[in-house]
Image (cartoon, rainbow, N blue to C red):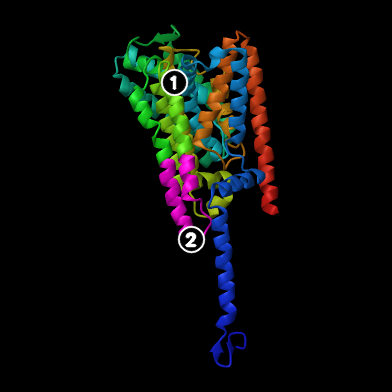
Amino acid sequence: MSNEMQGGQPRDTQVAPQKSTLLDRSDVRVKHAAGVGGAVGAFVERVKSGDLGSLPVIAGLVIIWTVFTSLNPVFLSANNLVNLLFDCSTVGVISLGIVCVLMVGQIDLSVGSMSGFASALVGTLWVNYGWPVLLAIVAAIVVGAVVGALYALLLNKLGMPSFVATLAGLLAILGMQLYVLGATGSINLPYGSTMVNLGQLMVIPAIVSYVLALVPGALTLLIGLRTRERRRASNLSAPSVGSLLVRSLAITVLLEIVVAYLNQGRGVPLMFGLFLGLAVAMDYALKRTRWGRSMNAVGGNHEAARRAGIKVGAIYTSAFVLCASFAALGGVLTAARLASASQQAGTGDVNLNAIAAAVIGGTSLFGGRGSAYSAVLGIIVIQSIASGLTLLNLSSSLRFMITGAVLAIAVIVDSLARQSRVSHGRA
């Protein structure tokens, strides 16, 4: 009683200074993050804590482009970059699915075979059986979704590790691809069809590409302002309007310059625009929805997520279904790019490149951390290496060795960053 009252009156004079101190500290935090300098300081702190984001892969991409441009200036020509973006789209879409399964701490080794089987299925249904092309594409994607659901069933009900289940699927689906193609081993798609034109010729009209380049900066500003208001309402540190404007303007200017340069050649490939659209939608789902938060939680600690009320089995199912569906769509785009479906589709390095792109781009092999944009950055790195070596007329063996080295470095950086985050958290 003596702690609350003195002489029959409340001791408000002791409580008020504490409240004022808390408000003062909050104001200091807000002011610290108010300017551009505060934003830079916050970025430096994130890097020190191990949250590197896309910084390593962007630095690596700059180095790769600088080296290849110094050896052959044609590398950064507009038309070569357009061809590079066409090639990025096929495996890049497959890599988006790999991001999903890696996020929950699983793996799918059959994405290459699934893409090859999907291309064979589209070719058979469309060319040999006369199905409408859109119906054939939908059928291929549905088959991919069913395969992904089967992997999830084996994991959830039987406890079969995804490594084993998808490895078995790789062999089985490859056999199905060979069976569907039959003795001929390949099916040529109608040259001049819309599907083939999408994979080889179609570009976004110049004026449309300039308008679309404005969208990311505008969305960045709008989302930033909404987040700022929520944080200020909770009395937390928040970036200033000026820093948000600078960031939005920088993104807009950069994208407009890139689009203007590509339009000096053939233009921005429509297929790459589709790939970016899927990446934006996936990024929004991972960061702004309950499902995305559940994906991160399950990947971080599936037992803790289960105890928190998250349906872990359903999250695993969604990840595998999305992964196999994206693999099927990637196979369709590959068939469009090559104007054929053959026994070689989905084989070779397709499987490994899809997985490597996700990891190189920044998705963690340990689960619980990743981004749809990691697939975009990672596949651009891989295709840049392939394009640069082709222009230099060097052996493909070097491409495998360099890509392997880049992948190893990416995993090492991810592991060190993870250890840094753990030690920083303990500190």
Give the camera-side residue of 380 and 206.
Answer: 206
Q: Which residues are magenta?
A: 219-248
Amino acid type, label 2: Ser
Residue 364 appears in the picture as rendered: yes
357 drawn magenta: no
Label placed on residue 234: 2
Q: Is residue 311 above or below residue 378?
A: below
Q: Report the residue that reaches farthest toward the bottom.
A: 7
Give the x, y percent position of residue 192: 33, 10
- Circle 1 is placed at which residue position? 262
Which residue is most to the top?
Answer: 184
> For the residues marked 1 and 2, what is the alpha-carbon distance in whole angstroms?
44 Å
Q: Image height check: is 323 above or below 124? A: below
Q: Secondary structure at mark 2?
A: loop
Of residues 212 and 371, the one drawn nearer to the viewer in this rendering: 212
In the image, what residue type sits under mark 1? Answer: Leu
